[in-house]
Image (cartoon, coloured by chain):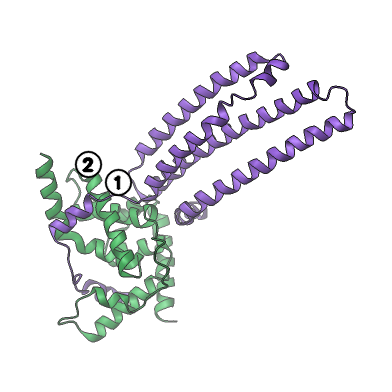
Amino acid sequence: MQKDLESKFLSDFEKNQNIVHKICRMYTTDQHAHKDLFQEITIQLWKYYSKFRGDAKFSTWMYRVALNTAISLYRKSTRIVKTQDISSVAYKISSVDYDDTEELQLKQLYRAIHRLSDIEKALIFLYLEDKPYKEISETLGISSVNARVKMNRAKEKLKKILNP
Amino acid sequence: MDLLDKYKKTWNNQPEEAHNLSKVEIYKMAHSKSTSIVKWIFIIGMLEFLTMIPFLFMETDTKHFEEMNILWLRKALDTISCAIVSFFVIKFYLNYKSISSLDNTKTLMDKIVKTRRTVRNYIFTGLSFFAIAILVMAFSSINNQFINETPIFKIGIIAIFIFIGAIFLGLFWLFYQLLYGILLKKLNKNYKELAKLDELN
């Protein structure tokens, strides 16, 4: 039983791991911290996997646990004293067949996102992932109205950073 | 097209991670040890329960209570101490167990903050007991050793006791603030940001 659960978890996670990588890219700025956060998210996902009933999509459930870990549970590793490394996003992404302009834009986007607060990052992430307000408010535990207000502010802030 | 729509397209087109993890790597990660703040709160909380126990059950000053003829108070305090430690340990454990990454972010943070508060209340209860013991010692010294001294001298003695007690409590408080301040800095900041939203609307 445990083995079945585990193998199902591993294949579900393997397929959807890019979601976690994207969250790690938003919340960390170097490879070491990325791996650290990824590991903590994996631990949390596995810890609660038996409670995941499949009435929601695995990816939806993953958003919640991963964001919770990034916002509330994860502590930045103190071993790393390095400041923001802008080019660090590049190493993580394979550049084969990838348009230069798009790569530049993606870097700009991540660089701008790094300047947002943790909560704003979560909002922007859910916006970029095209999540409806209902899901956003349920994930963060705030009302839809508040989610909308805060989202608009976060978007304005991001726009200003992107296009000062 | 809105500026962010343009970036949204870029976001959606972003390539996958260059080194996607294999099932074996995920398995290893899933079974490694958590370093989450919840775990730290649990470890530190348990240590606090242990370090406070000597304060709650100080044996050395029984004679002061005897001298003042309030041994019953001492016994009552001991019983209450036992009840308090049990109460807080159980409450702390239940709070800790209720923390789940499946909750929404706000509820999760609420529960973490509540768990920490349990320990804080426990610490303050322990320190109050310590303060009572200090005062009892001060008064028993006055009534026994310094019974014939002038009132000013007596006040001086009490002041010294209070001063020493205050320094001790102050240091303890500072250490405590520092410990949780560092641990929960990020969480508190995020918690405030979410809570502020509710106030605004």
SS at circle 2: loop
Q: Which residue is mark 1?
A: B102
Where B175 sits versus A150, above or below?
above
> Is residue A133 toward the left or the right of residue B60 in the image?
left
Residue sitting at 19 percent across and 42 percent down? A50
Residue A51: assigned label:
2
Question: Which chain gets the purple colouring?
Answer: B
Quarter occupied by the N terminus of chain A: top left
- Viewer-proximal residue among B92 and B159: B159
Q: Return the x and y of residue A86 as percentages of the image width and height.
A: 36, 78
Q: Chain of mark 2?
A: A
- What is the C-alpha distance between the residues marked 2 and 1? 9 Å
Question: Which chain gets the green colouring?
Answer: A
Q: Return the x and y of residue B155 as percentages of the image width and height.
A: 83, 32
SS at circle 1: loop
Residue sitting at 37 percent across and 64 percent down? A121
> Is residue B165 toward the left or the right of residue B199 in the image?
right
> Is residue B181 toward the left or the right of residue B131 in the image?
left
